[in-house]
Amino acid sequence: PIDSECIGGKCICKPGTTGYNCELPVTDGPPNVPLTGSGGAVGNNPNSAAVNCINGGKCLNGGTCSMNGTHCYCAGGFTGERCEKAEPCTALNCQEPMVCQLNKCVCPENKICTACSAQPCRNGGVCTDLSNGEYTCSCTSGWTGRTCTKDVDECALDPNICGNGICKNEEGSYKCYCTPGFTGKHCDSDVDECLSHPCQNGATCNNKLFFFKYGKHRILRQINAYECVCQPGYTGINCEIDINECDSNPCTKGSTCNDMINNFTCSCIPGMTGRFCENDIDDCISAPCQHGGHCIDELGGFHCDCANTGYEGQLCELNIDECESQPCQNGAACIDDINDYRCKCYPGYMGKNCEIHINECESNPCLYNGNCLERSNITLYALSQTMDLPEFFSRQFSYENASGYECVCVPGIMGKNCEININECETNPCGKHGTCNDGIGTYTCDCDPGFEDRHCETNIDECDRYQPCGAHGTCIDEINDYTCDCDANYGGKNCSVPLIGCLSAPCQNGGNCKPYLVNETEHLFNCTCQHGFQGDICEKTTTISMVVSSLITVKTQREEGYDINLQFKTTLPNGVLAFGTSIGHNEPVSYILELINGRLNLHSSLLNKWEGVFIGSKLNDSNWHKVFVAINTSHLVLSANDEQAIFPVGSYETANGSQPSFPLTYLGGTIPNLKSYLRHLPHRPSSFVGCMQDIVVNGKWIFPEEQGNEIDTNLTNIQAGCPRTEQCIPNPCHSNGACTDLWHTFSCTCQRPHFGHTCKYNITAATFGHENTTHSAVVVETNDSARRAIRSIL
């Protein structure tokens, strides 16, 4: 038809039509249900008898009941009044590889099919192929039989399946119709009629119960009913009716009844009383007389006796004002009471009528002999203009402020009660040389020793006052003391003792002796030694003579850095003075101090200078020269005589934060592989030949007499003192040759034509060249071996 569309061999109907070929109009039906051809129909045909699908009926196989309940609208592939019939191929539901042909499922020739391929199991049953070529069906609930086509009658199998209802069997299922009061699929749930809260006015709702026998048991079950238990004063099925207690006319003597909830009251006419207005009223029962007045009942009335109540009036309702006579004195306010009065006294007054004046000065509140003045003394206010009184009395007198007292304090005292002694020491009148003692209105100063006068300002000049140093000393004043600067050979506190400590000339080797006195009785001395000597009496020589093979080894170490002092003299231009190393320690550092071409040179791994540091000149002049070296984490100090240089050191870090340390110090000679310790030296160091004295390494003095006696000092091939002979005096060089002092020997620089060790040989001038001249020269180049041979001959 024009109102449909054919898709896949089925008619898809337009809205408003239905039927196999969409040939039927839709009169009513469920919304949103597609009605299609090939099974989308109303029942078997539009002329079939109507069914009741609402009241007990059921549309099968996904069919839908019409809105008026008279027809089933079937899903595609089904027909019949209740959609119980499947179209042949639809009912077969052939599964691959089976196909439907002539209302049967057949296996195509080119396919392999099993027993279950024909879909023998109906109504949702699950087919399982067996090994013998047969099959078995697992039926869904409500169906049985070999192919699940036989309906199970659940109502017959279990008569009690619906509990409190009637069971009706249906194809593949069943349905329970519940008796009133029950619900649920099996009618086993009670309907609680109290859930709708039918009972009113606070009544209690009870779901009604009944009993029945089940075998030997008495079973309590609920029925379709409820019962309301009303609150007092209400009735009715739902307690909706208020009971009128006035219906019985309980009130008498013309009184009015007032209905209440579960109660009533009676409004009596005047003169009557009682719950039911049954009693005549006693006019005094209501106690009309106020404030303790006595009521006397009379016919038709009463009167009040107000005697001794403090009140008056018909009902004793008027208070008698006892303050009207103004009984309170000294400005006090009167407060009327019942049959009495009270006076509110100002501070400073007391008594029933505030007639008693309180004497605040009676307890002597003013301390330190202060004078107490009462504020309530009116005469003082008039004298404030002519007398020196506290500021308070310059005001206008009033009882409000008349309580209390004022204290007039003696000088040096202050405070409300003269309790504060003014501390005259607060201004520090005794200065920094005295202790202030505060008194009453005054102070005194206890002066420190050596000071005097009222404020301890004057330093006592003990020199001027006592002249203690006499004729042999100059007095120097100090705080509470003096010092005598004694003349030579006098000592003691007052320079009164001749010093005899140096009379025995104890200082040796030219040491300077200085006597002194201990405890005014013990004579002692100090020796100031000449260079080259040390000891209490300058008895130890510090001078050491060194040759090429000499070497001093010192083991010493301290945490606060490194320093070395010494004096030296030599005539040789080169030589190692000192070498320090920390070889074998965690931070290997080293330094070398040497004489190079008569200048002092310091080279160290701590310096960022390849050539090292130079200082001084012509230091090989055979005179003594003083040298000092100090090294710490930040700087290196080098001084020669009065010349000094300070240089920053490179990065130096240790695990424990200590400063550079040189546990081993070598003096004078060289050690094997010395150059390997300082790889950047541009030359090979040579041993020192000459003398050293006053050698101090890290505070340790080096004495030649202790050679071999101490484990931390080793002196090899040295000699105490500095014995030597001047090599060039007199001049050993002949023929005006120039002599060079080489400490233990000399060398001569000869003038031509002289030669030899002492220039005592000469070469006869030869004549050759042009005109027998004697001024020509012949230059002969020789190698080292030839030069050594010539020297041996000469």
Image (spheres, rainbow, N blue to C red):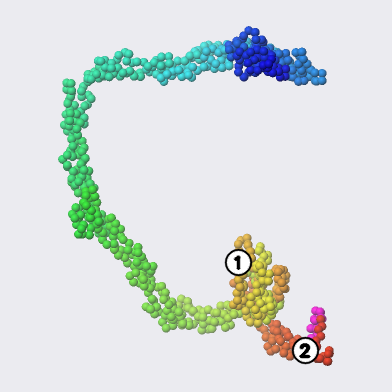
Is residue 105 one of those drawn in magenta? Answer: no
Q: Which residue is mark 2?
A: 753
- Snapshot quadrant of residue 617: bottom right
Compared across the picture, whether 169 is left or right of 255 comes to right
Relative to residue 484, is residue 331 depicted above or below?
Answer: above
Viewer-closest of 449 and 149: 149
Relative to residue 184, is residue 744 depicted above or below?
Answer: below
Viewer-closest of 449 and 771: 771
Q: Which mark is residue 634?
A: 1
- Snapshot quadrant of residue 262: top left
Q: Which mark is residue 782?
A: none
Is residue 790 one of those drawn in magenta? Answer: yes
Q: Position of residue 497 (x, y in %)?
A: 45, 81
For label 2, the crowd category at 10 Å Cα-Cα, with few meaning under 14, some 14 to 19 and many 20 or more, is few
Q: Position of residue 516 (x, y in %)?
A: 49, 79
| Helix, strand or loop under label 1 | loop
Q: Amino acid at mark 2?
A: Pro
